[in-house]
Amino acid sequence: NNNNNNNNNNKNSYRNNGFHRCALSYTVSVLSIACGSTTAGILLRYTQPGQQVHKICFGRWEEGRSQDGKKWKTLEHKGPLFPPEYEPLPQDVSFYYNGKPLRLSIVAEEVATFYAKMLDHEYTSKEIFQKNFFTDWREEMTAEERDLICEFSKCDFGEMHRYFVEQSEKKKDMSKEEKEVIREQDILLLCEYGYCLLDGHKEKIGNFRVEPPGLFRGRGEHPKMGKLKKRILPEDIIINCSNDSKTPEPPKGHKWKEVRHDDTVTWLASWVENVQGSIKYIMLNPSSKLKGEKDWQKYEIARKLKLKVETIRKEYERDWKSKEMKKRQKGVAVYFIDKLALRAGNEKEEGETADTVGCCSLRVEHITLHKELDGQECVVEFDFLGKDSIRYYNKVPVDKRVFKNLKLFMENKNPEDDLFDRINVSMFLLNNYLLFCNQLLLLNMFASLLSANMTLEEKLLSYNRANRAVAILCNHQRTAPKTFEKSMQNLQQKIELKQKQLDEAKAELKKAKSDYRESKTEKLKRLVEQKEKMVKRLQEQLKKLQLQMTDREENKVIALGTSKLNYLDPRISVAWCKKFDVPIEKIYNKTQRDKFAWAIDMTNEDFEF
DNA sequence: CGTATAACTTAGCATTCCTGAA
DNA sequence: TTCAGGAATGCTAAGTTATACG
């Protein structure tokens, strides 16, 4: 089934996808789909020459395959796609040292271009970035170059930078035909490298390209920003595939580091990255069966947790009064996670990454206790940097017992001491409920904000509001786009212009009316009608613009995608769409529909989380 | 059983694509 | 038809969780 159709309105496309996922290689058609909480059953019609058989295929996603830790039976692929080799600069473009042009060795030049390309980014103005870059760059130089190039301040990448700006302008100005040729080549590469064969089925790969070399750009105040991310060679790469499959060919003149056949993992290739020493993987796209099943499992666990959540809450409230300090800390930490959807907060190595924290790694300096604040009692003020160095700032009234405990935890401690010094994340994992407390909370909230008897637009607005509420709770932020202020101004101008037009139109209408009153000709009557229409249209346009303005303002720093993609059970959304007659394309775009194909397939309108 | 690290999910920013208003 | 600006997609960093290991 190579049904890559663009016809999104065709409901059958999901069905087709669905049975493609079902690991059958016959030509079949789906007669019906049934689903319970753990088992999805599909009634199929096998169409073979001269016979027709009906059969029920049960896919037990939960148990079954994962029992023995095997992730696949067969796996075949072409290996990753490498970035193009470095192309040296033209003769007339040069690096300058101490005011004089200097021709660099190929290797040193390549690293220099990484910096030159980033020159107009504010990263390059940071001292740590410059220092890390310069240190790593000098490592790549020849001995002579290293002798000569000793001071960063004497380096001038300006000409190189201008060259790259020029190049990208040229690229932009290419003709349609030229762009089309490039596009086609890209598609060919995608076809060749972008898919693999897993258990006999073609599946899309998520990231089939090896990450190109460049300068590391961490988030926030990362101590390693600017370090050289080295070029990855086939000799660095471990290939994973089944042993009877065709082993991918390394590029000419090269060898793989290793070819292994590990069916307990899902990755196709991996390598060690030099900046942090972590492993990078080539894995499947979220639309693949493998990832879909895992996602489904996640939500099933969350669903089971729903039945337990009251017990869990009672348990942690009891822990607040425990004699054991450890238990008290655990109780308060879980309370935070439940109430505020904080991340678990693993320990991390100091100096290796940006200084960010989650719940268990909160330090005394990150919270302030207020006996009373803005008319509320027992308020905890949080201020810390979380994942991706996104600031979490919140003032939360908490239970009195929690407040007392926090005071206790903070006694005789320095600001840089751990707030919860007796616990760590692994203690929660034993009970394995943290993450799902959050999800439950979010999902319930989400569901409760939706309702019937609305127009399509209102329904969608309500959906987005719910989505936004979840995103706010989870603190999913984005930095306002650089063009935000400008585009806001533009919009404001548009609104003003529209207002002016409206005022004028109104005046014209008034005049037309009075003209008509004086001499009741057909022509003037039509003019009045025309002006009335005009006013109405302008009013509508104005209202739309104003709505757009509020919506955009509200979304200024809120990122909706993350919660939609990772936290909200898609079956709730799908069921809601079916129940209230909202086309699924209105809430999920193509990528999202692909990722959630399993939910779209197996959910009917009476699904309850 | 605790810890290290491999594996895998979640996340925001950058780039590209597409659409709808002028 | 053009082009600004928003949506979609791509990329890879930064988390969490599972697993291996002593």
Image (tube, coloured by chain):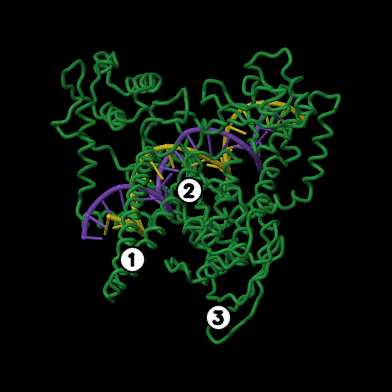
Chain colours: A green, B yellow, C purple
Residue at image location 76% in from the left, 30% down from the top: A330
Which of the marked residues, 1 or 2, is nearer the chain's N terminus?
A: 1
Which residue in the structure is indicated by mark 1? A513
Q: Quadrant of residue A339?
A: top right
The local crowd at label 3, few if under 14, some if 14 to 19, many if 20 or more residues have their Cα within 10 Å, is: some
Q: Position of residue A592 (x, y in %)?
A: 51, 56
Which residue in the structure is indicated by mark 3? A47
Badge number at residue A551: 2
**Alpha-carbon span between mark 3 and mark 1:** 72 Å
Instruction: Name the amino acid type tagged 1.
Output: Lys
Q: Nearer the viewer, residue A107 or A181?
A: A181
Q: Quadrant of residue A411?
A: top right
Q: Nearer the viewer, mark 1 or mark 2?
A: 1
The chain ID associated with circle 1 is A
The chain ID associated with circle 2 is A
Q: Nearer the viewer, residue A322 or A345?
A: A322
